[in-house]
Amino acid sequence: MENTASVHAKKIMLSGIQPSGDLHLGNYLGAVKNWSGLAEEFDCFYFMADLHSITVRQNPAELRRRSVSQLAQYIACGLDPEKNTLFIQSHVHEHAELGWILNCYTMFGELSRMTQFKDKSAKNAENINGGLFTYPSLMAADILLYQADFVPVGQDQKQHCELTRDIALRFNNIYGETFKVPEPYIPKVGARIMSLGTPTSKMSKSDPQGCVFIMDSPEEIARKFKRAVTDSDTENCVRYAPEEKPGVANLMSIYSSVTGRSFAEIENEFAGQGYGAFKRAVGEAVIETLRPIREESQRILADKEYLRGVYTQGAERASSAARRTLRKVYKRIGFVEKPF
Ligand code: TRP
């Protein structure tokens, strides 16, 4: 009993992850690495957002493979399934159900203003489907089902979080206190990692040459760092000056994240050495950081029974929380109680 009470005293954190590709160094150093520590302080839920994925056309075999392989990568990055609730969105049918309901409390005008909808419809002009438009109501359902206090989000999802708050407030105003109104969670730590090829843009899988994936082989990682863009200044000296020397600054951030050294220590370490030696050292440090993660991902991925156990247990835990909220919602809006 005591245990249950302390679990419920923790604030709830929730995030969805689109199973859209392998994790990269930017995801790892910027976010996931820090998530493992959050479980001490928060009750954390993370899920593979496969319902969201089908708003753009997917290859079924690929979607299935990626949902599981991404889950394995998150576990390998330190998300412990015993301490976090890890699950697959489509396994918890309450998401789709509350998603429909919240569609009826979300305005056409609000959805029309979402910048992600505008961007994605410009990119997928041949498939501007209803799901792409109502994507934010489903995301609101994901969050509100668990009465989440915090949602760790990047800049691109802030508008969706704002809309979630508006939907929750609207619903609560009509029917009385039903949903916790969530807040975006801006992590205190977490590096912003830029592309190795274009150090003024964020590292992204859409730019594979500038992007180091956690599943890349050591040879591949070494090659990508060797080709990393440093700056065309004449000083050829490792110095932290993000405006003037964004390429070097990015490599310094990466090196600092993986070794824990400060920028001043890094400048000292490479004093008198050129960019070539520096890039090699950063590449090696990243290889050694990612090696155990890649090996662990492969090991987990090969253990299908284990993974199945993880997402079964995750869905069970998630369902019981989701069911509680959905039941309350059905009652509030006037649905006849299900007799069976
Ligand atoms: N839309 C998010 C993204 O593209 C993924 C997501 C789905 C999500 N549901 C969520 C994130 C709920 C946070 C909370 O990154």
Image (spheres, rainbow, N blue to C red):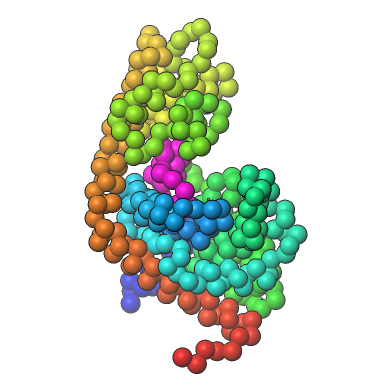
Where residue 49 sits: x, y (%)?
48, 58
Farthest residue to the top: give it.
234
Farthest residue to the right: give it.
109
Viewer can see residue 38: no
216 relative to 125, above or below = above
Where residue 160 sits: x, y (%)?
62, 55
* Region rendered in magenta: 16-37
183 relative to 230, above or below = below
Quadrant of res 228: top left
Q: Nearer the viewer, residue 141 or 179?
A: 141
Residue 32 located within the stretch drawn in magenta: yes
Q: Nearer the viewer, residue 53 or 310?
A: 53
Left or right: residue 119 versus residue 183 is right
Where residue 196 sits: x, y (%)?
47, 27
Where residue 236 sits: x, y (%)?
45, 10
Left or right: residue 4 versus residue 50 is left
For the point 69% across and 66% down, which residue is it?
106
For the point 43% across and 72% down, which residue is it?
319
Residue 152 located within the stretch drawn in magenta: no
Viewer can see residue 320: yes
